Amino acid sequence: MTTGLNTPPGVSQKLAATIGLPYTLTTGKAVGSTITALASKRLTGSYCSDCQRTNVPAQDYCVGCGGEMSLIEAADTGTITAATTTPEHTLLLVQIDGASSPLLHRLVGPAEGAVPGVRVRAVWADETKALFLDLEGFEVADSEAAASSPVDTTVDDAMKEMPYRLDLDYQHSYGPYYGRLFDELAHHRRLVGSPCPQCHQVMVPPRERCDVCFARTTRLVEVQDTGTLQAFSIVHLEFVGQTRTPPYVYAEVVLDGSSTRLIHVLGGFEIEKARDLTIGMPVRAVWKDASQAQGTLADIEYFEPVV
Amino acid sequence: MRSVAIVGTGQTDHSRRRTDVTQVGLAREAVVRALQDADLTMDDIDSVVVCTGPVLFAAVNQPEKWLADAIGARYKPVVRVTSGGGTGLAGALAAVNQVKAGIAERVLVVAYDKLSEGALQYSISTLYDPFWGREFAVGIMGFSAAYWRARMDSLGHTEEAAAMVAVKNRKNALLNPYAHVKKPVTVEDVLNSKPLCWPIKLMDVPPISDGACAVVLASEDAAKKSSRPAAWIRGMSYVSEAENAPNRSMIQSEPLTIAAQKVYKQAGITNPRRQFDVVEVQEPYTCFELSYYEGLGLCEPGGAAELIKSGATEMDGDIPVNPSGGCMGANPIGATALIRLAEIADQVRGQSGDHQIHGAQWGLMQAGGGWANLRGVAAVSSEKG
Ligand SMILES: [Zn+2]
Ligand SMILES: [Zn+2]
């Protein structure tokens, strides 16, 4: 079979994929102490005696000299240095009294009059939860600028760790080569590769250029769903994001008619016998039922040894 | 071409989890120690290279921005380099080139990862093609185990031979103050340890660590002003392979062979086994160290099992490999390659303390990412050459 590269109309051009990762972040002394102090409605800053610089909120290290900063109790009043209104909030840069640089937060209360130069005061949540939003924001309130007199503060039992998550959604474009590959997989249960016109190696998945001689490929050819086991390992490890339950066999297979390795799993035998598998043994694809086909590599349930 | 020397090194107190510092606090600790060792301050540094693993390891993008503040590097050139397990060496090469080109007299390289923050194997699986293979990926471990199994057939890299690497490196780690895993094991312990991705077993695997390393590189003029001994870079190379190219056997690493040959030519080395006094290699799993013996030309292809068995790579052998304990003592991935460079530099500077190889003048180090596709090598010497 020889096929061209035209993707039929009406076929999805994108693969939706999500990377979801849990984290336990280390806050460090400054952020940990700041958040812990917010729960008792106190704002924390940091002070560098070499640079005479005060940061609010607190930072561990001085942006001026890289030295360690000491923690101080900061004023809860300041002056707006910039403001912008979004559909949900008016965001403010507030120069806390005594601080060397402004703090980004939001306005609480009416937006009128919240312009640079206006005095503001911290607004605290009724019930604090040791989160940054225990400081709900700032409201317009006349006050004298607080005197800047750094007092060393230490917070007992400061927070050290914080749970966090990243859930990242992507839309990956197939492009003509992958598009045709997965169309063939979904509709005809066959795998295609691209032969290099110069070195005649057949690359699966198909690609525009040969990795070795960089010649441009111009056509697709069908490769077999049988092949040779190039390498395998027996997975016992459990980890976040795993798509199958251990134990199972990870495999790299070179399909008949191709010159590249395909990553998949082996099955069709008792897992206790997996150590007897041999490198170079012939294997073949076991396909899922047609009703479950999704046009991905997982349409192949596993590869099984040919006996 | 200008000569380049390492004039200061620093490592953190590596640990499975450091709850007392943020990522940048961790990196800063290594910087402070490297500057102390070099008897310099940030004012003496012209340029900074930051090295970390993939950002998904710790959820902060462009961490070099955050770090520049924490080490007092504002208004200095700062770039970040990332290249898997070889990251620290790739960054060192970038720094060496800055000095060689004459655009900097002293460059600070700082490499770190705080691996306790995220999900390691899953993060590594995102290195795979999202269309083709990612859902079957088992981080780097499934893949490495698979080709180790293949090497058993073709090169005789047996489970016993790999276990001897674990025994040697874990023993050496006992002498290294920066190693956070200090537990001697026997070959039987390793062979009987729990399979994770067979043939890789629990004790073939180094710890997962929070840690950082920093190195100060200097031109000849700048190095002369230093009161401490210098380690001269006599050769350095970092080479890549096309990951999915046709006909990759994965049995030998061509990039490693190419990098080693380039470095030996630069350094005038004709017999690495005899000419080097000490070697540091980055072994993500024990089986890797066996492969490096062959790729670095310390023995013939297929000779690694015999070499480890002979005891030649022990502390008191003729070619000691990983007197620091290698990754078995600590393995903060983004920092690991730079730790190997710092360790080998300290050997030829005579600063290795309890794990010093007496009188070491020539050192060889290796680092890389992936099973076979990114490999770097460096040669250092106590003499400028
Ligand atoms: Zn300062
Ligand atoms: Zn070609």
Image: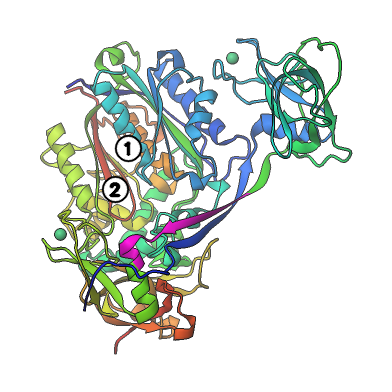
Quadrant of the frame with the N terminus of chain B: top left
Q: Residues within 10 Å of mark 1 (few under 14, many from 20)?
A: many
Residues at circles 2 and 1 in contact by the CB criterion of under 8 Å: yes
Q: Can you identify the residue that label 2 sits on?
A: B374
For image coordinates 36% across by 56% down, the residue present is: B286
Magenta span includes A176: yes
Q: Quadrant of residue B192?
A: bottom left
What secondary structure is the stretch in magenta mostly built from? strand
Q: Residues within 10 Å of mark 2 (few under 14, many from 20)?
A: many
Q: CA distance from mark 2 to mark 1?
A: 10 Å
Quadrant of the frame with the C terminus of chain B: top left
Question: Where is residue B61 drawn, in percent x and y?
Answer: 51, 39
Same chain for labels 2 and 1? Say yes or no: yes
Number of numbered callouts drawn: 2
Ligand 2 positioned in quadrant: bottom left
Residue B14 visible in the current orientation: yes
Name which residue type carries label 1.
Ala
Q: Tag 1 or tag 2, which sits nearer the N-term?
A: 1
Question: Where is residue A258 drawn, in percent x and y?
Answer: 22, 71
